[in-house]
């Protein structure tokens, strides 16, 4: 697991976009695993800008998102599908049929089966992830299993509280989600984690100061990945004991 410390969030975002573009340059039909939330917004900005400048072509790329709240339609402004449309899909030339998203209002069993079939047949070339304050990746909350495939999960009170900032009130945050499991994260050829902001400092510090891989601290699975890079800015780094 490699740690990259950048000057600021802008530089972190630029580095992430470069990593994604490098993978596409080497493999036109690369499979990208993608996150939502505030952390990757800057990366999407650069991917869109570079597409508009003709520096990257998504016409053969496949994408699969990490997760989705249950109960929210794609048109709901806080659904992850809507986020992806706003920040990437409506602005670049990734074909609609190459996009794998979870339908938060569909049958959970069908969504899970569709995701697991795709993940059995394909390997993610680069998986970008954010991190929850409690160390979650995707919506893999602290749990006892690391072998999980795609599954329905109850969100931790801490996650609901953290995500309330996107909703009018905390009670509007969905209580459950469907998430890609740890087994798909472990299988990815490359995983890149971006973290920014004071609230993430504790998780990043623990990730690098503690050698154990512990399902109760989900991001620790990155230590078992083939190629994992953690990108943090100087401000966050300065708040840790690293
Ligand atoms: C979102 C996801 C989550 C977020 C995490 C951090 O698709 O999988 O794990 O990456 O909750 O969210 P932000 O970036 O909003 O702090």
Image (cartoon, grey):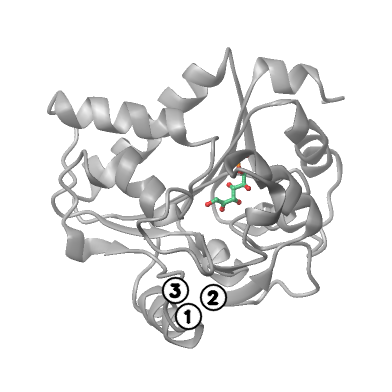
Residue that lies at the very extreme toward the top in this rendered image = 7
- Badge 3 residue CB within 8 Å of ligand 1: no
Residue 63 position by quadrant: bottom left
| Residue 55 visible in image | no
Cβ atoms at labels 3 and 1 below 8 Å apart: no
Q: Secondary structure at mark 1?
A: helix
Mark 2 or 3, nearer chain start:
3
Q: Position of residue 193 (x, y in %)?
A: 57, 42
Residue 150 tag number:
2
On the image, the x and y values in percent for residue 187 come to 51, 66
Q: Quadrant of the C terminus?
A: top right
In the rendering, which numbered label is found on residue 151? none
Out of 39 and 75, give the one closest to the viewer. Answer: 75
Identify residue for label 3.
105
Image location (x, y in percent) of residue 20: 35, 40
Q: Decide: marks 1, 2 in contact (CB < 8 A)?
A: yes
**Quarter of the rendering containing residue 141:** bottom right
How far is the residue under mark 3 from the one under mark 1? Answer: 13 Å
Disc on the earlier residue, 3 or 1 = 3
Residue 115 in view, yes or no: yes
Q: Residue 29 location, x and y as percent?
A: 21, 56
Seen from the viewer's position, the closer of residues 235 and 186 is 235
Determine if the C-beta at disc 1 is less than 8 A from ligand 1: no
Give the residue drawn at x 34%, y 78%: 121
Give the residue number, with chain letter if any, for mark 1. 112
**Mark 2 or 3, which is nearer the eye?**
3
Q: How many badges with numbers are in the image?
A: 3
- How crowded is the residue under tag 3: few (<14 C-alpha within 10 Å), some, or many (20+)? some
């Amino acid at each position: 697991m490699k740690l990259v410390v950048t000057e600021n969030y802008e530089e972190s975002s630029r580095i992430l976009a470069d990593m994604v573009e490098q993978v596409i340059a080497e493999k036109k039909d690369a499979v990208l695993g993608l996150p939502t939330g505030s952390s990757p917004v800057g990366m999407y900005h650069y991917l869109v800008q570079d597409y508009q400048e003709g520096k990257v072509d998504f016409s053969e790329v496949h994408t699969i998102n990490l997760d989705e709240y249950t109960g929210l339609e794609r048109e709901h402004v806080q659904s992850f599908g809507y986020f992806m449309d706003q920040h990437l899909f409506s602005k670049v030339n990734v074909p609609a049929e190459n996009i794998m998203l979870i339908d938060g209002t569909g049958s959970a069993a069908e969504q899970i089966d569709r995701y697991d079939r795709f993940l059995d047949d394909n390997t993610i070339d680069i998986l970008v992830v954010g991190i929850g304050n409690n160390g979650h990746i995707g919506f893999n909350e602290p749990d006892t299993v690391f072998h999980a495939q795609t599954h329905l999960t109850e969100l931790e009170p801490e996650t609901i509280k953290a995500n309330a900032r996107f909703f009018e009130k905390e009670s509007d945050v969905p209580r459950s989600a469907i998430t890609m499991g740890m087994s798909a994260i472990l299988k990815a050829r490359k995983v890149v984690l971006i973290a920014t902001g004071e609230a993430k400092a504790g998780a990043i510090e623990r990730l690098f100061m503690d050698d154990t891989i512990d399902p109760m601290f989900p991001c620790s699975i990155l230590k078992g990945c083939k190629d994992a890079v953690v990108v943090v800015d100087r401000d966050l780094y300065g708040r840790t004991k690293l």
